[in-house]
């Protein structure tokens, strides 16, 4: 079972806020009054000395602002993710840590994921993080190749959008980090942007034709022969979109056990 960090963060923020608010409304004044009475009777050195708050209240008051800021940033601005698989090679490698813009496709409430403000629509070629339709507790990352109403086809390792083959150009070979097998490296143009894709000459290609329903998006991995994507389980509903992947902020090279400095700061195209 995937760890629901978002749910835990919301719960922790709510609990700390409630404890702090209840104490301020119902208990803090009584503590101050008792201290004032004790000072008048000689039980305190200074009349009106500050009352000691319970440990639970002190922790709640200290953690609540921090948790609230993290929750707001993570829910409505940016969220970090780690790339665990090779499905987006050559664009993203295992060990990449990326920043996802949560504001790109609408402001959504945490946990409920209901949209409260529309701030933009996905475009073909966008690299997006979304909640996996078959298990929404898991986040996936793929590239949008089909918009609502599009007819998508994939035959002989060529992508077709509304009957037109997407332009690709061979640029050479690509060797995945830590491996020896060579993949065929191409540049693909979707809309106004270009990005790299790789094809495995020894792999099996998933083929077929698909019509993208309204309110949904067809996604594929850039590592076309090694990607679990919409060709297998269908399109992604708009309500499952998390945000647009924008930048690699850190990379950990698992082979050398160190930071991959060359990838840090690379924009995701």
Image (spheres, rainbow, N blue to C red):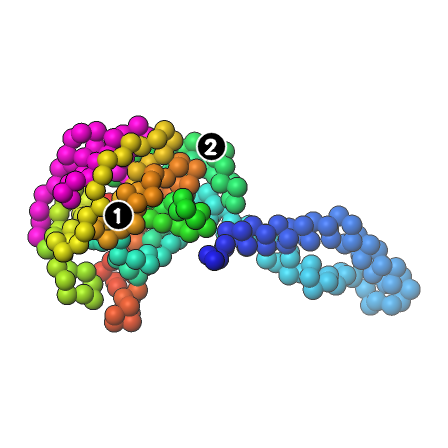
Q: Residue at the location (40% across, 41% down)?
A: 241
Q: Is residue 27 above or below residue 107?
A: below
First to last magenta residue range: 144-172
**223 on left or right of 135:** left
Q: Nearer the viewer, residue 200 or 62?
A: 200
Residue beneath the point at 30% across and 38% down: 218
Q: Is residue 50 left or right of residue 131?
A: right
Q: Residue 139: percent from the left, percent from the top?
A: 40, 50
Q: 208 and 128: which one is in front?
A: 208
> Can the viewer see residue 257?
yes
Q: Quarter holding the C terminus?
A: top left
Residue that carries the numbered disc 1 in the rendered image: 221
Q: Which residue is mark 2?
A: 117
In the shown orientation, is residue 15 left or right of residue 24? Answer: left
Look at the image and tell me whether residue 143 can be seen. Answer: no
Q: Secondary structure at mark 1?
A: loop
Q: Secondary structure at mark 2?
A: strand
Residue 207 located within the stretch drawn in magenta: no
Q: Are marks 1 and 2 in contact (CB under 8 Å)?
A: no
Instruction: Pinpoint residue 222: horizontal percent, then vertical percent.
Output: 23, 48
Crowdedness near tag 2: few (<14), some (14–19) or many (≥20) residues, C-alpha within 10 Å: few
**In the image, is residue 171 above or below residue 41?**
above
């Amino acid at each position: 079972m995937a760890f629901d960090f978002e749910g835990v963060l919301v719960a922790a923020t709510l609990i700390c806020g409630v404890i702090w608010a209840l104490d301020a409304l119902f208990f803090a004044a009584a503590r101050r009054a008792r201290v004032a009475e004790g000072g008048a009777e000689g039980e305190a050195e200074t009349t009106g000395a500050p009352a000691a708050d319970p440990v639970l209240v002190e922790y709640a008051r200290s953690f609540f602002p921090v948790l609230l800021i993290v929750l707001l940033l993570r829910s409505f601005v940016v969220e970090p993710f780690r790339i665990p698989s090779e499905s987006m090679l050559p664009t993203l490698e295992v060990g990449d840590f990326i920043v996802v813009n949560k504001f790109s496709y609408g402001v959504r409430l945490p946990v409920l994921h209901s949209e409260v403000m529309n701030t933009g629509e996905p475009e073909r070629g966008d690299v997006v993080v979304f909640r996996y339709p078959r298990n929404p507790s898991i986040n996936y990352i793929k590239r949008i190749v089909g918009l609502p109403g599009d007819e998508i086809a994939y035959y002989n390792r060529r992508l077709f959008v509304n009957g037109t083959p997407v332009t690709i150009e061979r640029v050479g070979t690509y060797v995945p980090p830590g491996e020896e097998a060579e993949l065929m490296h191409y540049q693909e143009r979707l809309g106004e942007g270009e990005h790299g894709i790789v094809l495995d000459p020894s792999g099996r290609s998933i083929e077929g034709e698909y019509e993208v329903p309204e309110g949904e998006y067809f996604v594929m991995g850039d590592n076309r022969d090694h990607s679990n994507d919409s060709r297998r389980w269908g399109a992604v509903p708009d309500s499952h979109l998390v945000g647009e992947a924008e930048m690699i902020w850190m990379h950990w090279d698992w082979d050398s056990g160190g930071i991959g400095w060359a990838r840090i700061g690379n924009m995701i195209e």
